[in-house]
Image (cartoon, rainbow, N blue to C red):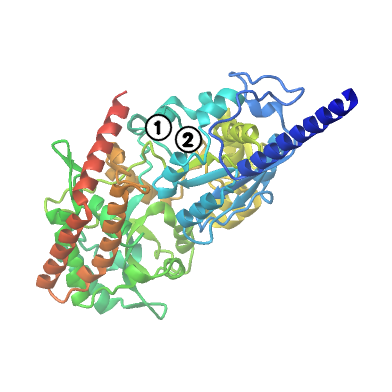
């Protein structure tokens, strides 16, 4: 009997073990595609590895080979990792090989599909304004960087900067992303480097042949377009496109044009409705008149990226509402072409009725894009350490300048690009980026405060545009960037509907047969905007602005 009871006990014990094992396996499978809320507090450094020291970069503790996938939310990003000198050097030093991924189409849609599947790349870089960023944070798809830093690399706090961490800190006290190209107003005031890149550009030779016409008033603008049509309709056998607006309706023809017109963002502490500003409406009507007279067509509203690139490369635009740094590769090429005066220069464009100078967006604390670490990664410790390295002065130097002795030398105590690198920057930027990978090839965690000290002097055809933008930047207006609601909330959906409708209405306004039709279309849009919930959008903007002001005052 004892033997039978013992046998039964053993069988029951084995059965219990099997049940627990199956449960563990099932739980493990379920967790594969489910983000965890935070890194395990019981995790220990790998065997033989020292505990991270807040004073020492933790990437040095483990430089064994590893591959991290990195999603860059820009379909136009052309670079790879592992072929260029700079990327090879970083991999050799840190052990981290990077597999870069870019979306084939719209970044928001691409990353949303990844969230649905539960499989995300190790590192994610997205525009700070993108809806998906909030979804990643609120949906628990990415790690709180402060929690990873506490556990794996406290040196992160030394390089991330308290200002940035504070700016991006969420209500729960966590920070989920680090920005690139982030500028504080204090830094801009101190250095005069504003990171402003909005400019109004004209083709130098045509503009000067016309006698440098006044483009700041509706009358002068229309007269210049008429002169272009009458005397300069073609260039190299191809029709000249009179006008281009970067980013089409939502950017070039809306907030960008409003900045040129110095339309205020707030009045007496209250967020201002810029679309109904009288000066802005006057200029929209000016474009309508230009279309009615056959002085512009709708190509600037419908051209594909390929068409824009082809026209730009062949100097077939006369005027452009365009960020000057988008001309960094083209302008030097045009200046060294058979027609060396066919490059573009920044001039005063449309102004308000008072003739005020433009108030252009500078850089801001939001930066351009934010980089995050997803909870799909199997190596959160290597990911945070790699991110910390890239954000440090050492990492910034390695990616921006490359390898000492090969792409840069120490000259009078300052890291300085070799002459041949500077020459490539002016004459063959594609080779510079592909073979050497230096300068702005890998900009995902770029910190201008660090790297700008190493930049070579810009060519005159670029510096003119940059200086013009800096001179017209409204340094304290960076706080107004990105006030609009994002995500899936009711107010965000309302704003999405309004924005979509505005994109549809703008072509109707510009092609309206007369001013009365323009007014009717515009009033109809405003009524629809109200019905979609614009009052809630204004409330959201006001609350967001108040929060930002409070953060800046801390």
Residue 231 in the image: state x and y as whole percent: 27, 77
Considering depth in this image, is 543 or 442 the residue closer to the camera? 543
Would residue 119 be found to the left or right of residue 320 on screen?
right
| Residue 443 in sight from this viewpoint | no
Q: Residue furthest right?
A: 3
Q: Residue furthest front?
A: 1
Residue 340 in the image: state x and y as whole percent: 43, 64
Marks 2 and 1 close (CB-CB < 8 Å):
yes
Q: Is residue 109 above or below residue 144?
A: below
Residue 130 in the image: state x and y as whole percent: 41, 49
Considering depth in this image, is 477 or 7 the residue closer to the camera? 7
Gap in angstroms between the C-alphas marked 2 and 1:
8 Å
Asked which quadrant contains residue 376, the reply is: top right
Q: Residue furthest bottom?
A: 237
- In the rendered image, which residue does mark 2 sit on? 176
Asked which quadrant contains residue 9, the reply is: top right
Residue 26: assigned label: none
- In the rendered image, which residue does mark 1 sit on? 170
Q: Residue at x 48, y 55 (%)?
A: 107
């Amino acid at each position: 009997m004892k033997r039978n009871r013992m046998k039964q006990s053993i069988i029951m014990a084995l059965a219990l073990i099997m049940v627990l094992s199956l449960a563990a396996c099932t739980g493990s499978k379920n967790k594969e595609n489910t983000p965890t809320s935070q890194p395990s507090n019981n995790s220990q450094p790998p065997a033989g590895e020292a505990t991270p020291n807040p004073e020492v970069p933790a990437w040095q503790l483990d430089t064994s080979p590893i591959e991290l996938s990195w999603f860059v939310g820009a379909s136009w990003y052309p670079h790879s990792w592992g072929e260029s000198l700079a990327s090879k050097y970083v991999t050799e030093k840190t052990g981290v090989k990077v597999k870069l991924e870019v979306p084939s189409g719209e970044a928001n849609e691409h990353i949303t599909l990844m969230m649905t599947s539960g499989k995300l790349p190790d590192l994610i870089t997205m525009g700070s304004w993108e809806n998906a960023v909030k979804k990643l944070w609120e949906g628990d798809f990415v790690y709180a960087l402060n929690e990873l830093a506490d556990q794996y690399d406290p040196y992160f706090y030394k390089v991330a900067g308290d200002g940035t961490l504070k700016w991006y800190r969420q209500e729960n006290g966590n920070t989920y992303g680090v920005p690139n190209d982030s500028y504080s107003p204090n830094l801009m005031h101190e250095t005069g480097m504003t990171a402003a890149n909005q400019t109004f550009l004209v083709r130098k030779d045509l503009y000067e042949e016309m006698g440098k016409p006044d483009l700041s008033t509706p009358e002068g603008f229309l007269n210049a377009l008429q002169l272009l049509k009458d005397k300069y309709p073609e260039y190299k056998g191809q029709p000249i496109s009179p006008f281009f607006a970067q980013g089409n309706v939502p950017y070039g023809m809306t907030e960008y044009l409003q900045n040129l017109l110095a339309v205020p963002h707030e009045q007496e502490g209250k967020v201002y409705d810029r679309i109904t500003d009288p000066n802005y409406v006057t200029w929209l009507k000016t474009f309508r008149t230009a279309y009615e007279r056959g002085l512009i067509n709708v190509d600037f509203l419908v051209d594909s990226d390929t068409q824009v690139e082809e026209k730009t490369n062949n100097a077939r635009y006369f005027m452009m509402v365009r960020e000057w740094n988008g001309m960094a590769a083209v302008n030097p090429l045009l200046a060294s072409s058979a027609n060396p005066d066919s490059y573009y220069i920044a001039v005063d464009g449309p102004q308000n009725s008072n003739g005020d100078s433009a108030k252009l967006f500078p850089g801001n604390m939001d930066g351009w894009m934010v980089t995050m670490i997803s909870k799909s990664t199997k190596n959160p410790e290597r990911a945070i350490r790699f991110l910390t390295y890239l954000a440090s002065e050492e990492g910034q130097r390695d990616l921006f300048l490359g390898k000492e002795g090969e792409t840069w030398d120490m000259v009078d105590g300052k890291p300085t690009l070799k002459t041949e690198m500077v020459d490539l920057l002016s004459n063959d930027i594609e080779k510079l980026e592909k073979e050497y990978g230096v300068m702005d090839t890998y900009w995902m965690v770029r910190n201008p405060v660090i790297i700008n000290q190493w930049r070579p002097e810009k060519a005159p055809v670029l510096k003119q545009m940059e200086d013009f933008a800096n001179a017209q930047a409204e340094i304290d207006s960076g706080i107004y960037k990105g006030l609009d609601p994002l995500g899936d909330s009711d107010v965000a959906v309302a704003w999405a509907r309004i924005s979509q409708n505005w994109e549809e209405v703008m072509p109707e306004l510009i092609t309206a047969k007369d001013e009365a039709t323009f007014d009717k279309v515009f009033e109809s849009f405003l009524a629809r905007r109200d019905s979609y919930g614009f009052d809630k959008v204004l409330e959201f903007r006001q609350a967001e602005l108040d929060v930002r002001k409070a953060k800046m005052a801390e």
